[in-house]
Amino acid sequence: MKELIIKYKEKGLKLTPQRLAILNYLDGNTSHPSAGDIYKHIKRVYPTVSFATVYNTLQVLHEKGEVMEITIDPQKKHYDPNTKAHHHIICTECNKIGDIFEDYSGAIRLPHHIAEEFKPVGNHINFYGICKKCQNLSRYVSKREKQKRRD
Amino acid sequence: MKELIIKYKEKGLKLTPQRLAILNYLDGNTSHPSAGDIYKHIKRVYPTVSFATVYNTLQVLHEKGEVMEITIDPQKKHYDPNTKAHHHIICTECNKIGDIFEDYSGAIRLPHHIAEEFKPVGNHINFYGICKKCQNLSRYVSKREKQKRRD
DNA sequence: TATTAGATTAGAATAATTCCATTCTCGTAA
DNA sequence: TTACGAGAATGGAATTATTCTAATCTAATA
Ligand SMILES: [Mn+2]
Ligand SMILES: [Mn+2]
Ligand SMILES: [Zn+2]
Ligand SMILES: [Zn+2]
């Protein structure tokens, strides 16, 4: 936590209580929260916090390379404070997102004709699956009802 | 086109002019349009068509396995009538999406502990890059201005 | 402690997507 | 043919995600 403060001051970020709350929530968080998830959580401590502040903070953190934006859930972006290159798997039933720390970089080279047309800047693999919990639920709960359990 | 009609009737889809227009627009289309792109295009021929109809049609087509939903642009979904397994590259400047018909399936195996937790149902690689056009534009156009050129 | 760049806020605006009630129509059975 | 009924189309409202703005506030520092 102290490290966090130092780290962000070094980056020229102003540390406000709201920001600190967001940083603390994100620090070490492996749940891949959406902006809404973060907002809901921070609001418990700072009931007056604005959604805009969450988005603003996520934006600067993203620009500073401190969080990854994850495009795997078609409904919304998710954020990841772990900026080491890695991939994700999302449960197609409940949208839970898991980390995949395999290094596939050697295996997923772009074909030449694409590399000529696009200057590559990165890649990310979206895996889709059904998590254990949803596999069990499927035995007796309709898909429609499960939809309601999503965030 | 005749084939299209037969094909979709076989699937138990009711063919209406609006639907046919959407099907025709999608048939062989490699531009990876968003729902809005499709809507704008169809409206030229059927000015009264509803956005809801576009979404409805995309939904049934997706359920029937006739179009892929592509989650690569953080702003919105894109659709692809080519349902053969393939991957995509998106220009981080203008959001243009290109096809990658490489087979990486042998190379991107899930780690065991993940395969235990998730029953795999698929995967998709998002490549990010900067397209030729945007590489050139970058010489004299600000990023903000380029943002405006996006759809 | 005064200054001020940068942060926060509420709320409006925009954009994507979904939902719903009503109306319409395609395909078929009489 | 024609009437019927399932499914489709429609418009408009509702939701949800995200962005923008203008007014106000405050953390950092001189
Ligand atoms: Mn992650
Ligand atoms: Mn494609
Ligand atoms: Zn699940
Ligand atoms: Zn481009």
Image (cartoon, coloured by chain):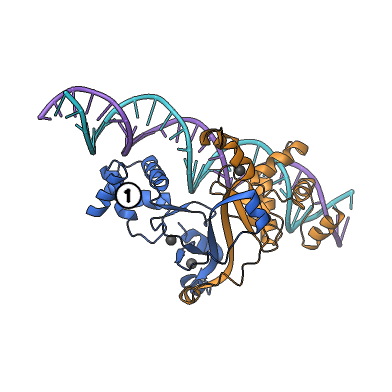
Chain colours: A orange, B blue, C cyan, D purple
x then y, percent, for residue C23: 29, 28
Which residue is found at the position 53% from the left and 64% from the top?
A: B105
Dot 1 beta carbon under 8 Å from ligand 2:
no
Q: Where does the image place residue A3, in percent across and percent down from the top left?
A: 85, 57
- Relative to A83, residue D8 above or below: above
Q: Nearer the viewer, residue A109 or B103?
A: B103
| Mark 1 residue crowding within 10 angstroms, few (<14) / some (14–19) / many (20+) | some
Q: In this view, does A133 lie to the left or right of B101?
A: right
Residue A143 position within the rendered picture, expressed as x and y whole percent measured from the top left? 52, 36
Q: Dot 1 corresponds to which residue?
A: B22
Residue B122 sits above or below residue A104 on the image? above
- The image quadrant that residue A87 belongs to is bottom right
Q: Where is ligand 2, by quadrant?
A: bottom left
- Give the residue displayed 70% in from the left and 61% down from the top: A83
Residue B62 x, y percent position in the rendering: 42, 47
Q: Tally the numbered discs.
A: 1
Name the quadrant of the C terminus of chain A: top right
Q: What residue type is labelled 1?
A: Ile
Residue B92 in view: no
Residue B50 as seen in the image, left or right of residue A20: left
Between A127 and B111, the residue placed more toward the observer is: B111
From the viewer's perspective, is residue B13 above or below residue A9?
above
Q: Indicate whether B150 appears above or below A22.
A: below
Q: In this rendering, would A27 be left or right of A97?
A: right
**SS at mark 1?**
helix
Residue under mark 1: which chain is it in? Answer: B
